[in-house]
Image (cartoon, rainbow, N blue to C red):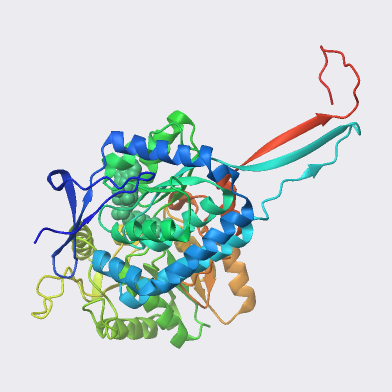
C-alpha cells in the first residue's frame, strides 16, 4: 500500500506530493512510515509567499477586527472538537504523551480565543500636540505576511503562540512546521478552511532547512517568527538582516530549578521531576539544572532519583505511560552522546545513563530517565541544552551562590524557585536572568502570560498582550488644521 501523503497548502492549491522527492515522517515508537510530505522547492516557497501577499492585499486586510475574531472563535471550537485527532497525529509524529498533546490542542484553542478577544481592540492613540492646530493620531496596521517556523516538539502549541496574534492583527501567514512532525499543522489547515478563513490567509510549506532558508530570505515578509535551536535562530536572524525583516526568536534553554532549604520538599521534588522528565525533557523550558541547597541536598537527591527510577517509559498513547521516546533518531543520538559526555567527564550517575533495553519496546527510541549528581556548574552537561530526560543536580550553599549559578549559562529562558519565604521568592525572582520565573510551580503556562527568553534563549514574547506587538506596525498621521500657508524652509512643529 502506498504511504499517505500530506500536501502543502499554497493559496487555493494543494500541490500533490511527489513521492520521488518527498520527505518521510516516521514513528519514534516503531520506526514505521507515517506519511510523506513535500520538500518545498524555492519556487513553491515563493508561490506560498505570493499567495499570502495576494490574500492580504485582496481580502484579509479589509476584514474587520470582529470578523477576524469570529473566525478565530470558530477555529478554536473546531480545534476543541478535534483535539483527540490532532493530539493523536502529534503523538504519532513526535512520541509525546497523548494526554499532553491532546491538552496542548485545547491549550492552543484557548490561545486563539484569547487573541480573538484582542482583534477588535487594536486601537491607536490620539496624541496631544504642542501646536493646537495640529491633529495627530496613530494607526496600528498589520505587517502583511508573516513567516512562522516551528520545531517538532509541540507543533500545534508553538504555532498557536504565533498564529493567534498574527491573525488577530490581520496578517496572512506562511507556516513551515518541522519536517519531523508536520502532520498536525497540515490537518489544522483543513480546520482553518472549514472555519471560513479566506484562501491565502494560511499557507503551509513543508521541508527542511532549505525550504526554511528560502522562506526566511524572502524580502516581502513583514515578520519572521521562529521557534527552534539557537544555531538556526542565528542563521535566520542573519538572513533576515539582509532584508531588514524583523524577527522574533524562541530558542533553547538550560533552565535552573532552585530548591531552597525552606521549601516544601514534597512539592519541590515533584516540581523537579516534572521539570525534566515530562515530555522526556524535550521542551525548551525543561528544568535541566536542579540547584539544591546543601542542608537538604542529600534528601532531595534521594527522592528525585527514587522517583526517576520508577517512571513508566513506554507507548505514549497509553494512559499508564509517563515518559515516551525521544522524538527522532537524531535526537536519540544526541541525548545518548551528551550522557556519554557526562560520564566521561566524571560526573556521578545516580540513575539511568543509556537507552532503554526492553524486549517489549524493541524499536522505540527510548532513553532512561537519567540523573547526574554533584555536577560541576561549569561542565558541559550543566551548560549545554540536551533536550532529553537528563538532569544535572548541582549543590549550592547561599542564596547568592544559587543566583550566580542559575545565571551562569548562555541561556535565559525559564527558572523555578522553591521556597516558603515570600521575601526570598520575590528577591530571587528579580535577580534571575530569565524571561519566565515560576515560584513553587514549574512548567505552568497560560494564554495571558508572556512567554520568551533573554540572552541566547532569544527575544520577543509570545502569549499575553505583548505578543501582538511584533505583528503590528505603528503609523503616525499628522494633520494641519490651520489652513494657513507656511514658510517652506522651516520645520513645522
Ligand atoms: P531546529 O532549529 O533544527 O528546527 C526548527 C525549525 O527550523 C524546523 O522547522 C526546521 O526545519 C527549520 N529550519 C532548519 N534550518 C533552517 C534554516 N536555515 N532556515 C529556516 N528554517 C530552518 O530545531 P528543532 O530541532 O526542530 O527543535 C529543537 C530546538 O527548539 C531546541 O533547541 C529547543 O530548545 C527549541 N525550542 C524552543 C522553544 C521555545 O519556545 N523557546 C520551544 C520548543 C523548542
At 36% from the left and 83% from the top, the residue drawn is 298
At 51% from the left and 59% from the top, the residue drawn is 434
Q: Position of residue 144 (x, y in %)?
A: 52, 40
Q: Nearer the viewer, residue 393 or 147?
A: 147
> In this rendering, does residue 415 appear at all?
no
Please indicate whether residue 463 sits to the left or right of residue 257 in the image.
right
Quadrant the C terminus occupies: top right
Residue 139: quadrant of the picture: top right
In this picture, is 283 found above or below 209?
below
Residue 4: quadrant of the picture: bottom left
At 55% from the left and 65% from the top, the residue drawn is 113
Q: Position of residue 168 (x, y in %)?
A: 57, 54
Q: Position of residue 265 (x, y in %)?
A: 46, 85
Q: Nearer the viewer, residue 160 or 441?
A: 160
* Tally of numbered tags: 0
Please indicate whether residue 149 sits to the left or right of residue 29 in the image.
right
At 8% from the left and 80% from the top, the residue drawn is 359
Quadrant the N terminus occupies: bottom left
Amino acid at each position: 500500500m502506498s504511504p499517505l501523503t500530506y500536501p502543502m497548502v499554497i493559496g487555493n492549491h494543494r500541490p500533490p506530493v511527489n513521492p520521488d522527492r518527498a520527505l518521510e515522517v516516521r514513528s519514534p515508537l516503531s520506526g514505521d512510515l507515517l506519511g510523506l510530505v513535500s520538500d518545498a522547492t524555492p519556487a513553491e516557497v515563493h508561490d506560498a509567499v505570493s499567495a499570502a501577499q495576494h490574500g492580504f492585499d485582496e481580502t484579509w486586510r479589509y476584514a474587520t477586527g470582529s470578523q477576524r475574531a469570529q473566525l478565530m472563535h470558530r477555529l478554536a471550537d473546531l480545534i476543541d472538537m478535534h483535539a483527540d485527532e490532532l493530539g493523536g497525529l502529534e503523538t504519532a509524529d513526535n512520541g509525546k504523551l497523548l494526554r499532553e498533546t491532546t491538552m496542548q490542542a485545547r491549550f492552543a484553542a484557548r490561545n486563539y480565543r484569547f487573541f480573538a478577544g484582542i482583534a477588535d481592540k487594536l486601537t491607536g492613540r490620539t496624541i496631544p500636540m504642542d501646536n493646537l492646530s495640529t491633529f495627530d493620531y496613530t494607526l496600528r496596521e498589520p505587517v502583511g505576511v508573516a513567516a512562522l517556523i516551528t520545531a517538532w516538539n509541540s507543533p500545534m502549541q508553538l504555532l498557536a503562540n504565533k498564529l493567534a496574534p498574527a491573525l488577530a492583527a490581520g496578517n496572512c501567514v506562511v507556516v513551515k512546521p518541522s519536517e519531523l512532525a508536520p502532520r498536525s499543522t497540515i490537518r489544522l489547515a483543513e480546520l482553518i478552511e472549514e472555519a471560513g478563513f479566506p484562501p491565502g490567509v494560511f499557507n503551509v510549506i513543508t521541508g527542511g532547512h532549505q525550504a526554511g532558508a528560502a522562506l526566511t530570505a524572502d524580502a516581502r515578509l513583514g515578520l519572521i517568527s521562529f521557534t527552534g535551536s539557537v544555531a538556526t535562530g542565528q542563521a535566520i536572524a542573519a538572513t533576515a538582516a539582509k532584508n531588514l525583516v524583523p524577527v522574533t526568536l524562541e530558542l533553547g534553554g538550560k533552565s535552573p530549578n532552585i530548591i531552597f532549604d525552606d521549601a516544601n520538599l514534597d512539592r519541590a521534588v515533584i516540581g523537579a521531576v516534572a521539570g525534566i522528565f515530562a515530555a522526556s525533557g524535550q521542551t525548551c523550558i525543561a528544568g535541566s539544572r536542579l540547584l539544591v541547597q546543601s542542608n537538604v541536598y542529600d534528601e532531595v537527591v534521594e527522592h528525585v532519583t527514587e522517583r526517576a527510577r520508577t517512571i513508566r517509559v513506554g507507548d505514549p498513547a497509553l494512559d499508564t505511560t509517563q515518559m515516551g521516546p525521544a522524538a527522532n533518531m537524531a535526537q536519540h543520538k544526541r541525548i545518548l552522546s551528551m550522557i556519554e559526555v557526562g560520564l566521561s567527564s566524571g560526573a556521578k550517575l545516580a540513575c539511568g545513563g543509556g537507552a532503554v533495553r526492553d524486549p517489549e519496546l524493541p524499536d522505540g527510541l527510548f532513553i532512561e530517565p537519567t540523573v547526574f549528581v554533584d555536577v560541576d556548574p561549569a561542565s558541559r552537561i550543566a551548560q549545554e541544552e540536551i533536550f532529553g530526560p537528563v538532569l544535572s543536580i548541582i549543590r549550592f550553599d547561599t542564596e547568592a551562590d544559587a543566583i550566580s549559578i542559575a545565571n551562569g549559562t548562555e541561556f535565559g529562558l525559564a527558572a523555578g524557585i522553591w521556597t516558603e519565604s515570600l521575601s526570598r521568592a520575590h528577591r530571587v525572582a528579580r535577580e534571575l536572568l530569565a524571561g519566565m520565573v515560576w515560584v513553587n510551580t514549574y512548567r505552568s503556562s497560560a494564554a495571558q502570560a508572556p512567554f520568551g527568553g533573554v540572552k541566547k534563549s532569544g527575544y520577543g514574547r509570545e502569549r499575553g498582550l505583548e505578543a501582538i506587538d511584533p505583528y503590528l506596525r505603528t503609523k503616525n498621521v499628522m494633520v494641519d488644521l490651520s489652513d494657513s500657508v507656511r514658510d517652506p524652509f522651516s520645520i513645522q512643529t
